């Protein structure tokens, strides 16, 4: 190992790729361990939430659903925290992303790329663009502490693209954190009912 920035002296890396601030530096073993703990909580029975908590959780999910269906992806992106994760697992219930593939496993940087890609209008798999409408229901909420909430819900997404209508069903697992200005999504896991089956052109946003 050569230079102080960690680059090997025998490997030439362009300077524009040497800045690790563009990497997913926050997704480390501690982050994965936290995912494991939270995933277990989503499998448990929760006490009935108070009316205010349930109302706020439902309103948050309804707003997110509307932003996605209206194609307002920049506004949707602002719902996520800087250390966020957007996860669509292949394994039912999540599995272990360390060793198992996912349909999507996006940190904030990759999620920003996804939004930019969708907004260009040049993505081949989204010509023409998907038109979607989703229903979100059976909302449950759990307040872990004053700054962390878990929200569990069911969803049905109807997609119309290129003359073909498709329906996707499953359940969401949202982890929200309280920031200075609002509640934001730290982890969104979209668990498809048929996640392990073959899906053609799974490029819509869940």
Image (cartoon, rainbow, N blue to C red):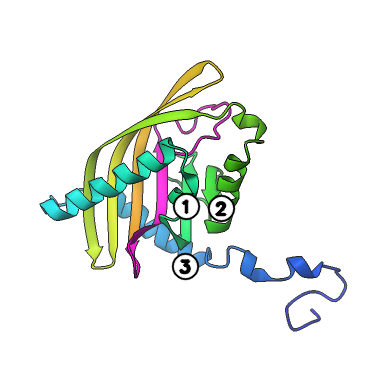
* Proximity of marks 3 and 2: CB atoms separated by less than 8 Å: no
The reply to whether residue 44 is in sight is no
Quadrant position of residue 50: bottom left
Q: Which mark is residue 112?
A: 2
Q: Kindly give the residue lying farthest to the bottom in the view shown.
A: 4
Picture quarter with the N terminus: bottom right
Q: Give the side of residue 130 with respect to residue 47, left or right.
A: right
User: Over which residues does the magenta segment extend?
Assistant: 177-206
Quadrant position of residue 5: bottom right
Q: Name the foreground residue: 156 vs 105.
A: 156
Q: Kindly give the residue lying farthest to the top in the view shown.
A: 163
Residue 109 vertical position relative to residue 160 in the rendered view, above or below? below
Q: Earlier in the sequence, mark 1 or mark 3?
A: 3
- Residue 145 % position (x, y): 24, 67
- Residue 63 % position (x, y): 32, 45
Q: Name the foreground residue: 110 vs 127.
A: 127
The magenta stretch spans residue 80: no
Q: Give the side of residue 165 with respect to residue 12, left or right.
A: left
The magenta stretch spans residue 193: yes
Element assignment for label 3: helix
* Proximity of marks 2 and 1: CB atoms separated by less than 8 Å: yes
The residue at which mark 3 appears reads as 30
Q: Which mark is residue 77?
A: 1
Disc nearest the viewer among 1 and 3 = 1
Element assignment for label 2: helix
Quadrant position of residue 22: bottom right
- Residue 46 % position (x, y): 19, 51
- Residue 39 % position (x, y): 36, 52
Q: Earlier in the sequence, mark 3 or mark 2?
A: 3
């Amino acid at each position: 190992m050569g230079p102080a920035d960690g680059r090997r002296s025998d490997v030439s890396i362009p300077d524009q790729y040497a800045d690790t601030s563009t990497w997913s530096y926050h997704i480390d073993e501690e982050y994965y361990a936290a995912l494991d703990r939270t995933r277990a909580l989503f499998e448990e029975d929760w006490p009935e939430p108070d009316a205010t908590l349930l109302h706020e959780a439902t309103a948050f999910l309804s707003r997110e659903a509307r932003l996605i269906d209206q194609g307002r992806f920049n506004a949707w992106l602002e719902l996520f925290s800087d250390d966020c994760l957007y996860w669509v697992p292949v394994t039912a219930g999540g599995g272990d992303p360390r060793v198992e593939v996912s349909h999507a496993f996006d940190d904030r940087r990759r999620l920003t790329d996804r939004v930019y890609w969708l907004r260009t209008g040049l993505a081949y798999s989204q010509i023409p663009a998907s038109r979607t409408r989703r229903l979100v229901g059976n909302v449950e909420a759990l307040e872990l502490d004053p700054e962390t909430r878990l929200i569990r819900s069911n969803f049905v997404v109807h997609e119309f693209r290129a003359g073909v209508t498709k329906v996707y069903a499953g359940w969401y697992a949202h982890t929200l954190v309280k920031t200075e200005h609002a509640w934001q999504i730290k982890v969104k896991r979209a668990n498809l009912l048929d996640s392990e089956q073959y899906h053609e052109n799974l490029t819509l946003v869940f």
